[in-house]
Amino acid sequence: MRIQYIHICLLSLSLISAQSVSLSLLRSKKPTAQKATLGGMLDRNGNPANKERADLLCGRAVQHDFSDETEEDRSLRKQRANAVKAGFIYAWNGYKKYAYGADEIDVLNRRPKTTRNGWGATLVDSLDVLWLMGLKDEFYMARDFVAGIDFHNDGGQLAKVFETNIRYVGGLLSAYELSGDKVFLEKAVELADLLMPAFDTPLGLPWQMLNITTGKGSSETPGTTRTNLAELGTYQMEFFRLSQLTRNAKYHEAAQNAITVMLRMNPLGGGSEPTYTIPGMYPMDLDMMTGKFAGSTAYWGGGGDSFYEYLVKTWVLSDCMLQRDLDLWTESIRSFRRFGVARSTDGYLFPGLVDGVKFYPYVDTFTNFLPGTLGLASKLSGSEEYFALAEELMEAGYSVFDKMESSLGAEAVRFVRENVTSDYQLLNERGRADVDKYGLSLERPYYLLRPELIESLFYMYRLTGKRIYADRIWKIWQGIQRNCLVQNGYVGTANVTVDASVTGVKNTIDSTESFVFAETFLYIYLTFADQDTASLDKVVFTTEAHPLSRAYKFDGSF
């Protein structure tokens, strides 16, 4: 979800109503439908998507039937939902008082921060949270702010294209679908059109950074033409829905072309020194001028994560008609199961980095998206085998949190594999001490309120109905309350191995990115809200937790 390079040395009735409004707005304009020429509806062998099979898969109910919930459980759940909502309101009031309309709040210093071009990243990212929590006065106040955003004024910063898409464009699209207010769609289209020059490259692969004023793109690392897998493939959902709402195929085709080029330029085992050697395990780094992989390390964490996530979720969003996405996901998850995981000495199945035939037992918190996404895909496809894999990965991810005194997980850890003694021997003295105590070496022992583990626990709760997953989220929420709650909001904690309730000191990191409001709070709240709020049978969440409706049908036309 967040990009980070790794190198190893609702929606119930309101959504249905909004859907009707959205469709009526589109019909009133009567645009000419466009056929997608690079729509991804052909499978890997060039065969068209099977509509009957797509209807069968997408017609399956995936969310657990909670009708047997006891009154006692319902009462407890609502108490917890109210507590989380109160926490969000507390944080929102701090943002409103000291940084309203700014990208972020510097909580400890009580001032605004400009980190995403000054367009109000936290506000736009949180629109759907305000709606889903029933904070309509705040929502409509934010709506008026959105109407006045000048996207042509970039705040003197280059736009990070990937982040601008998932935080701003995704947030605006979700707000439009929920409320039916066309100002959100208009602003989403305006911003997306400003981002389109990023795709104006020899092969159509998007630049990482973009000067909004000049339309000139660049890589994040000056003097290079590098990009990564996640920043290449995480436009599919937002751009697909934009094409549906505008009936303009250009957005969808741009996103699909990036994947088409990647596949065409990197045949399996191609070249004198091949870097892509395992089907579906794509190296993270690419050269966007040549389209070729610029390394051999495959990873499902930072730098690769949302590429794989969007294969599944865009397929679902497309009414299960974008067959290529499903084929790519199926190939990738099969290879991941075989090559991308290893069991630790304390019995957990963790993902890691794969470089050719070498496996590195390193895992960051971004990999925690996988149990939830895999669980969703497995329920739709009817695969008990892969759902069991999702459950195993969920246990491993949660163990990193559960072993810590704070109940919060480290940003990144290294584990020791069963029967691989060299993993332990290669650690430094501190790392070996960590393993002796926790079974893990804490490579980055801080917690920045990231949502991925919570997200997957939410999915597993909604998919299975097992209260243990909700209880785990509540335990994490209590850890956040003890260690991250400060005056005017919430911040990160520098050391997850200690708990402020014991030490009496909060070892804070002054970081409150927009995803804290947009994702972390939302997934915790939805776990305890009424289960028909953002039902997994009605919506699919983007990588930034923006719910998009599954009600749209797709036949290849826009």
Image (cartoon, rainbow, N blue to C red):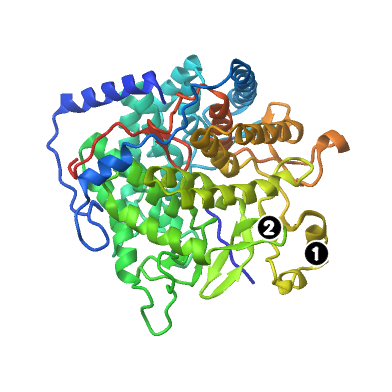
Q: Residues within 10 Å of mark 2 (few under 14, many from 20)?
A: few
Chain-order first, disc 1 or disc 2: 2
- Of all residues, the one furthest to the bottom in this rendering is 272
Which percent across, then down, holds residue 497? 79, 47
Q: Residue at x 28, y 57 (%)?
A: 257
Q: Secondary structure at mark 1?
A: helix
Q: Amino acid at mark 2?
A: Gly
Q: Secondary structure at mark 2?
A: loop
Q: Residue 183 — which label?
A: none
38, above or below 316, in the image: below
Q: Residues within 10 Å of mark 1 (few under 14, many from 20)?
A: many
Q: Badges 1 and 2: C-beta atoms under 8 Å apart?
A: no
Q: Residue at x 68, y 66 (%)?
A: 417
Q: In front of the other: label 1 or label 2?
A: 2
Q: Tag count in the figure?
A: 2
Quadrant position of residue 171: top left
359, above or below 64, in the image: below
Q: Residue at x 59, y 15 (%)?
A: 71
Quadrant position of residue 432: bottom right
Quadrant position of residue 25: top left
Which percent across, then down, holds residue 556? 19, 45
Q: Is residue 128 left or right of residue 553?
A: right
515, above or below 202, in the image: above
Q: CA distance from mark 1 to mark 2?
A: 18 Å
Q: Residue at x 80, y 37 (%)?
A: 506
Question: Which residue carries the number 1 mark?
Answer: 432
Which percent across, then down, holds residue 275? 44, 75
- Taking depth in this image into account, of 450 and 212 the one nearest to the observer is 450
- Taking depth in this image into account, of 142 and 132 the one nearest to the observer is 132
Question: Which residue carries the number 2 mark?
Answer: 347
Q: Assign the C terminus to one quadrant of the image.
A: top left
